[in-house]
Image (cartoon, grey):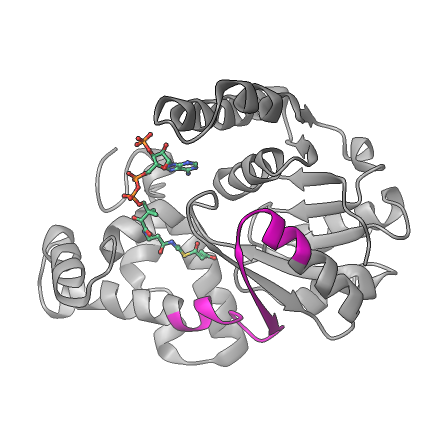
Amino acid sequence: MTEIRTIGVIGLGAMGGGIAQLAVEAGYDTIGREVSGELAEAAAGRIGHFLTRKVEKGQLEQADRDVAVARLTTTTELDALAGCDLVIEAIVEELEPKRVLFAELDGICRADAILATNTSALSVTEIAAATARPERVVGMHFFNPAPLMPLVEVVQAELTSPETVESAAAVGARLGKEVVRCHDTPGFVVNRILIPLLNDCLRVLDEARVTPEALDSAMKNGAGWPMGPCTLVDLVGIDVHVHASEALHAQLGEPRMAPPERLVEMQREGKLGRKSGQGFYSY
Ligand code: CAA
């Protein structure tokens, strides 16, 4: 198994920022890459904030928080990831930009480095095919919010070596996650089930003529969900959910996998959920 000491995280949005937070807390030297210095600084600020909250709540020692924060460096240059043992990609949920990025990383990173994608529903095999090292490309799919959700799916693509799977699984375990190993099927395990289910929920809004508040209350109180579907989709991001739905629909063709029209409309209007200040709810 490859020994992982330094982790690169590309894209420090909700998912990448959460993954970088987990990595520094677990003791990995971590290099976070963003497209601008301002975005990188904002992400580092959010990580510092969440770790400070843990100190305030007695879940983390101040000294450990400070050491963890110091393990994070940020950059806007991909070349800065040349020394990483593992790079986890968490950029926009679209195939072409991911393939372009993986081809670039393939030229920058050491031949024995592992390249992981946090894709929700795209084919890891197709992403890996953009590199000359598909045996060292793997899916590491975290759930939003990554620091709080206990699962990581470790996805074995067509050519991923068993050693790469085990190295990624070992990192997942050290990040404190429950690891589920799976194959590269559309949506893997959770999203294959959760995305069409959430789409059903959102169609019920119109069919049963209920408000988002009523639907959320129904699923929390009638099905034991920790948060209602509208709150959850706002958290995940309307755009992320639409992209994941489109990817599943393209691969499996079931009508219920297609994003509900209401969501596509919200995306067009820039109502992307919590991150844009407006989704089903206002933030
Ligand atoms: N990063 C780091 N820390 C965070 C955080 C984040 N994004 N968000 C919250 N926290 C911290 C905060 O410090 C917060 O404490 P304070 O408010 O005191 O500062 C602390 O976590 C606890 O937050 P909450 O009080 O909100 O915690 P909760 O007990 O209400 O649980 C939850 C929150 C775990 C998110 C729970 O509501 C839940 O399980 N919801 C379901 C989430 C889910 O299903 N996620 C999967 C989405 S699907 C997906 O991700 C797949 C995909 O590919 C699209």
- Residue 177 on the magenta span: yes
Would residue 71 be found to the left or right of residue 237 on screen?
Answer: right
The one nearer the camera, 199 or 221, is 221
- Residue 160 in sight in this render: no
In the image, the segment drawn in magenta is 170-193
Residue at image location 36% in from the left, 43% down from the top: 272
Point out the image quarter for the N terminus: bottom right
Where 172 falls versus 25 (above or below)? below
In the foreground, 214 or 177: 177
Tally of numbered discs: 0
- Please tell me in which quadrant of the rendered image residue 182 appears: bottom right
- Identify the residue shown where x is 53% and y is 23%: 65
Magenta region includes residue 51 = no
Residue at 43% from the left image edge and 49% from the top image edge: 144
The quadrant where ligand 1 appears is top left
Percent across and percent down for residue 251 are 54, 76
Question: On the rendered structure, is 133 left or right of 212?
Answer: right
Q: Is residue 39 above or below residue 194?
A: above
Task: Indicate left or right for 48 with 233 as reference.
Answer: right
Residue 164 placement: quadrant: bottom right
Q: Is residue 66 left or right of 197 when viewed as pictured?
A: right
Q: Residue at x 57, y 34 (%)?
A: 25
The picture places residue 169, in percent across and down from the top left corner, at 65, 59
Q: Is residue 78 visible?
A: yes
Q: Position of residue 29 (x, y in %)?
A: 71, 32
Residue 196 or residue 55, whichever sits in front: 55
Q: Position of residue 27 (x, y in %)?
A: 65, 35
Quadrant assignment for the C terminus: top left
Residue sticking out furthest to the right: 111
